[in-house]
Amino acid sequence: MRLSHFILDEMEAILVEWETFAATLLPAAQGMSSLELRDHARPILEAIARDLSTPQTRQAQLDKSRGLAPVLENAPETAAQTHAVLRARRGFDINQLCAEYRALRAVVLRLWQDKGGAQPLELDDVIRFNEAIDQALTESVSYFSSQVDRSRNLLLGMLGHDMRSPLQTIQMTAHHLAKLNDGEDISVAVARLIRSGARMQALLDDMVDFSRTKLGLGIRVVPAPVDVAALVGDELDQLRVAHGTQRVELDVKGDTGAVCDGRRIQQMVGNLVGNAIRYGEPAAAVKVAVIGEDREISIVVTNCGPAIPPSVLRRVFEPLERGPDAETRAGSHDGLGLGLYIAREIARAHGGEVDAHSNESETVFTVRLPRRAPDVGEGRPRER
């Protein structure tokens, strides 16, 4: 059987092998569905089968093996290119992307051999198949790299934009302070400095945490005995001051004692509630519940407002993601699109998780934390 016919006839068997291998590429593949693991494998294989069936000159074959196949102007993305973008967004690294193609090459040839192997006249199919795989890999790596570069440039651009405003406030206030000698005016100016400095610090903290997770170091936590409800209440008091007219309500049920990193819990709650304030209905209260159960503590943040579209909800915890109307909402310029991502990483660093659901009336984020963060040794910070 010619290889192109074999690929089309045995597509499902090949896809099962692709999916099985993709599921081993952790941590990026963790929690991915079968559809997500397979991604664009079928159209990639179909494109390869078409390529094998299409007459080509020796020069065209040589160019393709070097990743130099001609690109049509204004042509849509190939399946391999789109696959690279989606894998980059899911957190796969370049080595994992290349490993998928190496495994695909081996799987197809092994299954083909099991069906009868390559006859002498079909040796050209093997050569052509390898060339097609090399071309698909080149396309994916190229788009993968451009996606990584785009994310980095986007992050730096947003950082520069978001830091400019508070930095200018600090500089202008500092000059104003130098000319003042009235006590009340100085107090107001100092308060402005403190608020702007805190905003800058929050942005920098998000940047540091994001960088650590991308380097595989995880969020640093130092567990200690705390009252989660008291921590949440203190954080909400600060948010009420910062957001003035926005109502934030707290409801506490059960025993809320736990062993966790109090500062990180407050950071996580601040990110979740800040997001609820930013995207919720301004006239409606943001409701926060802390619920102590037998083995875990839940923190539930609810805001009223329009439903988050399913396509957005699936990506809501991914870094650099912001709501579709972020630019038009008050206060949306205060962040880098990292708040929910970091909230999830803080929960995971404690052995917990965050999930979200949304309907036409409300959006709910639920954090579930074990009563004690995983043991890591006395006095040592935990890293994921």
Image (cartoon, helix red, strand yellow):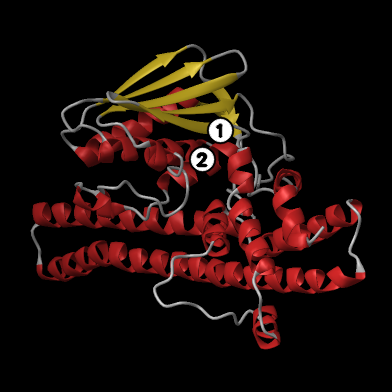
Q: Position of residue 343 (x, y in %)?
A: 47, 41
Please tell me which of labels 2 and 1 falls first in the chain.
Answer: 2
Total labels: the figure holds 2
Bin the neighbour count of mark 1 within 10 Å (Cα to Cα): few under 14, some 14-19, many 20 and up: some
**Residue that sits furthest to the bottom in the current view:** 59
Q: Which SS class for mark 2?
A: helix
Q: Amino acid at mark 1?
A: Glu
Quadrant into which the N terminus falls: bottom right
Can residue 31 be seen here? The reply is: no
Residue 231 lies in quadrant: top left
Q: Is residue 17 left or right of residue 335?
A: right
Distance CA(mark 2)–CA(mark 1): 6 Å
Residue 194 lies in quadrant: bottom left
Between 129 and 378, the one lying in front of the other is 129
Between 267 and 132, the one lying in front of the other is 132
Bin the neighbour count of mark 2 within 10 Å (Cα to Cα): few under 14, some 14-19, many 20 and up: many
Q: Position of residue 100 (x, y in %)?
A: 71, 58
Q: Which SS class for mark 1?
A: strand
Query: Circle 2 sits on which residue?
Result: 344
Q: Position of residue 96 (x, y in %)?
A: 69, 59
Q: Amino acid at mark 2?
A: Arg
Q: Position of residue 24 (x, y in %)?
A: 74, 47
For the residues labelled 2 and 1, say whether their Cβ atoms are less than 8 Å apart: yes
Q: Which mark is residue 285?
A: none
Q: Residue at horizontal 57%, vertical 56%?
A: 87
Residue 115 to residue 378: above or below: below
Q: Residue at horizontal 31%, vertical 57%?
A: 197
Between 207 and 328, the one lying in front of the other is 328
Between 303 and 99, the one lying in front of the other is 99
Query: Circle 1 sits on which residue?
Result: 353
Can residue 197 be seen here? The reply is: yes
Q: Residue at horizontal 20%, vertical 67%?
A: 174
